[in-house]
Amino acid sequence: MSKLLSPRSNTEYHRVFLLIINNLKSSLCYSVYSVVSFD
């Protein structure tokens, strides 16, 4: 548990979290764009 609270782990977790969020945004934007272009 103490490892999770270390600054280094928090930074890595935050980085991974941001990457996941960015990937989700890209996928969502791509999906919306596809639907709009089909329409």
Image (spheres, grey):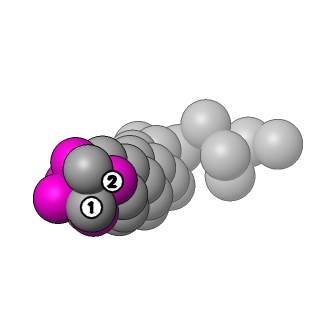
Query: Residue 28: x and y, percent?
Result: 37, 50
Density class for disc 2 (Cα within 10 Å; few <14, some 14-19, many ≥20) is few
How far is the residue under mark 2 from the one under mark 1?
5 Å
Q: Residues within 10 Å of mark 1 (few under 14, many from 20)?
A: few
In the image, 17 versus 10, the foreground residue is 17
Nearest the eye: 15 or 10: 15
Locate the N terminus by quadrant.
top right
Residue named by callout 1: 38
24 or 11, which is in the foreground? 24
Task: Specify the farthest residue to the top.
Answer: 5
Measured as percent of width and height from the top left, residue 18 is found at 32, 49
Read off the residue under disc 2: 35
Identify the residue at the far right of this view.
1
Q: How many marks?
A: 2
Assign a secondary structure to mark 1: helix
Amino acid, disc 1: Phe
- Residue 19 quadrant: bottom left
Q: Main secondary structure of the magenta part?
A: helix
Q: Are marks 2 and 1 in contact (CB under 8 Å)?
A: yes
Residue at position x 61%, y 37% in the image: 5
**Residue at 27 percent of width and 61 percent of height:** 38
In-image side of 10 versus 18 (left or right): right
Q: What amino acid type should be assigned to the residue bearing mark 2? A: Val
Q: Closest to the observer: 35 or 30?
A: 35
Q: Residue at x 17, y 59 (%)?
A: 37
> Image check: 10 left or right of 26?
right
Q: Which mark is residue 16?
A: none
Element on which disc 2 rests? helix
Give the residues in magenta: 33-37
Horizontal relation, residue 23 to residue 26: left or right? right
